Amino acid sequence: RVLIDAFVHRYMDPALRPDVVAGLDARGFILGAVVAYELNVGFVPIRKKGKLPFATVQETYALEYGSATVELHTDAVKPGDRVLLIDDLIATGGTMMAGKKLLEKLGATVTEGAAIVDLPALGGSAKLQAAGLPLFTLIDFAGH
């Protein structure tokens, strides 16, 4: 409860309150769905390729040894929606950056990226912030 409350209390602030919470596959679903419920806003999943049943937009991103693709339903958000993008962990930032790009393709504004844990030594949080995405994390494991 304390973990969820830390996110919910932050995003109850009218300046930060989202219209929609988007959760990254798969642990972002658990955290994001509960936060969305507590804020009384919608939740949308950003899934690995091939998991969503309807029309989607895709974004491919680099992994250490290859690439991965994530998808979002084309009707998941509306232009102008304020979206909180949430996951459990920020490591290299690739998945969160791909999620940000997907949401922006549909005209949404990603107001903040949030995670429980940041591993700053892997460079993801710096990369995301350099791309203009403000971040909120509860724990930083420097040097992981």
Image (tube, rainbow, N blue to C red):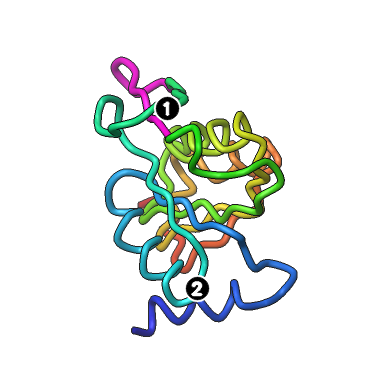
Instruction: Kindly identify the residue that appears in the image at 41 percent across and 51 percent down.
Output: 23
Tell me which segment is drawn in magenta. Answer: 61-72
Relative horizontal placement of residue 25, taking residue 80 as reference (left or right) = left
Nearer the observer, 144 or 125: 125
Question: Residue 25: image x %, image y %?
Answer: 31, 43
Mark 2, secondary structure of its residue? loop
- Left/right placement of residue 80 relative to residue 135 reads right
Marked residue nearer the N-terminal end (2 or 1): 2
In the image, residue 72 above or below residue 68: below
Among the 4 quarters of the image, the one containing residue 127: top right
Residue 67, how many percent across, how many down? 34, 18
Tell me the residue at 37%/63% (across/down).
Answer: 33
- In terms of image quadrants, where is residue 103? top right
Q: Amino acid at mark 2?
A: Asn
Element assignment for label 1: strand
Residue under label 1: 56
Check if residue 103 falls in the magenta segment: no
List x then y, in percent, for residue 12: 61, 77
Give neighbour class at mark 2: few <14, some 14-19, many 20+ (Cα, 10 Å).
few
Residue at the (47%, 68%) spot, across then down: 138
Q: For residue 40, which numbered disc appears in the image? A: 2
Q: Amino acid at mark 1?
A: Thr
Q: Is residue 87 above or below residue 50?
A: below
